[in-house]
Image (cartoon, rainbow, N blue to C red):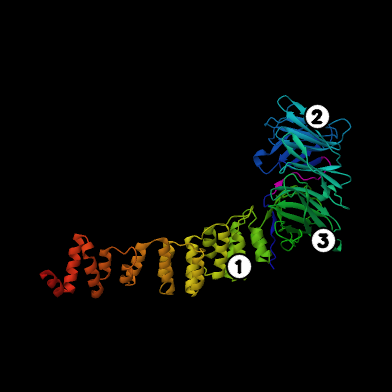
Amino acid sequence: MPTESYLELSKNPIRFEALLNKFNNVFFDEANKQIFVVRSGGVMGVSVKGPDPDTNLNFRLEDHAPIISIKFSPDRHILAVQRSQTSVEFANYNGDGSLSAEYSQSCRKGSKMLGFIWTGPSYVAFITDNGVEPFQVLHERRSVKALKAITATADWFKWNADCNLAILSSGQGTQLQPISFKSGTATKLAKIELGTGRSAADRDVTLALLRGSPAVILLCHGLGGNNCAEVLVYQSPDSGSPMKISHFLRLGYSGKFLINVLDDLIIVHHQASKTSSLFDISLPGDGEGHHLPIATPKSFSPFELELPDKTYVCELYTPSWTVFQPNIIIDAKLGCLWYIELRLESLASHISDIETCVQVLRRRWGGKGVLLRVLHNVISENNPKAAKALEIAASLEPGCIPLEQDDIYKNVLSGLEPEPSLLVAYIRALARRKQQPQHQLSRLLVTTLVRRGKMSDLHQLIRHGAVADSKPLACLLLSLGNVHEGSTQLALDMLARLGAVSEIHEVLFGQDAVLAAAHLSPPPPPRKLLDAAKQDPTLFHALYRNHRSNIPQDHRLLFDKIYSKMFAMIILEDTRL
């Protein structure tokens, strides 16, 4: 079993000032993927870093009160700062490191703010214990306009900007209320009923985009066998329907977990064992929605941080790790933000079942090259599941990498002489896609079958249209006539179906079957018949006597000379008559 890890931390993490004293605070803006380091309430400066170094910022704030949350609008024109549970302060960012005069907005009287989110460049929503209060921020006027609010009880909430969805928890975590946002409009969706005996804590809920649809991922402790934790995935079966449990992920561990969703793979990190498990819910599982990890749980590859005076080997899976979607890990004490990276080559080597491996790779971004190499290897090794793996790879499904015939031929089959059954399985898969095999693929199949003497199989494939008639393929069958004589007849039958009469004439001439060519309808031109019969005086004589009058005058003299040399006495007698 390979020992190399299939997960690694990005080689160049975003470095920020570590959380080493009580005067500094670190915040993360999930929508803009930015780290805010606030020194002494902002008086000593605020530094903002994100994935694009050109958008890194530095500015100062007045220290009115401790900061609870701080975020830029999506276009980074407006800074919002929450310092209390009743209001948010706004300031226009001028682009030169300075902020304009502040303006503020309070939530409804009697409500307590749980947090706020930006739902558009100029739209913000306050999440309170009594519901959702959307606002439009008019930064040019330095004012805020209230929009239609939603009433809902909430203890805590989760927000994911990628799917424009918030989840509000109520009833001590027994009910989850989804709220969708479109700019300044908030819409209440059907509640998620967790089920009898289930409740959700803030730390155990992950909101993510999974296979193009919002998903609530709930970590449940002590539900699995041997008191192990399980992960429940809630998704809507169709647009407008409430979210329901669609998948169960069996972890085999208990303890503290963190969850990321990367490239539609659910990654569950286990602190105690320092390992991560990968789940792909697009696989069938056990048929009832239960899934095991697609590969043996592994730790991240070791990470070394280059410091000015030394190389520091980072401790992995520490209590100071925090994760954000889709693939972010932050260690505030170390001052690093990493992106999780998936090593597909290594992952493929850890998946023992080839069919599962193909299914996993064909759904991963950047998996095409690895998938083609895997297919080439299993075919060259005569893996008994190679035909099925190739058939799976050739099928078309939403969200899967499309492998065209050129991809398969050039990168998988070229240079090999695979089993005919494998090629037939692939061609049948193409037929289900309503595609005919290209010439290079048909050529490989025909050559393989002829060399192995499987003419009856080839005849059946051609008869049922699995291999399309074409002149190049007929020529290939003719060239293989010295390997198996039956291929010549297959070629002639194919040319006949194509109506390629002149090509049939040439084939028969090449076989010295001039008389057979003469009996075809339509027959070859007389000139060609006589030219092909020159080596057989008897046949030439018969054809000359029957077709001389049909030969153009300029060619007739030529054949008269040939005839006179063969039959001088006969031509002389004919002249006297």
Magenta part mainly helix, strand or loop? loop
Residue 152 in which image quadrant: top right
Nearest to N terminus: mark 2 or mark 1: 2
Rendering coords of residue 422 (x, y %): 57, 68
Viewer-nearest of discs 2 and 1: 1
- List the residue tagged with mark 3: 253
**Type of amino acid at the residue the image marks with label 3:** Tyr
Q: Total of numbered circles in the picture?
A: 3
Locate residue 527, reporting x and y percent. 25, 64
Query: Which span is picked out in magenta?
Result: 13-23
The amino acid type of the residue labelled 2 equals Gln
Judging by the rendered image, the residue that carries numbered circle 1 is 386
In this rendering, position of residue 278 left or right of residue 221: left
Quadrant position of the N terminus in the picture: bottom right
268 falls in the magenta region: no
Query: Is residue 529 in view?
Result: yes
Q: Residues within 10 Å of mark 2 (few under 14, many from 20)?
A: some
Q: Nearer the viewer, residue 518 or 226?
A: 518
Q: Residue at point 72% right, 62% down? A: 295
Task: Give the numbered dot on residue 105.
Answer: 2
Q: Residues within 10 Å of mark 3 (few under 14, many from 20)?
A: some
Marks 1 and 3, how far apart at CA: 34 Å
Q: Quadrant of residue 512?
A: bottom left
Q: Identify the element where label 3 is drawn.
A: loop
Q: Is residue 406 left or right of residue 521?
A: right
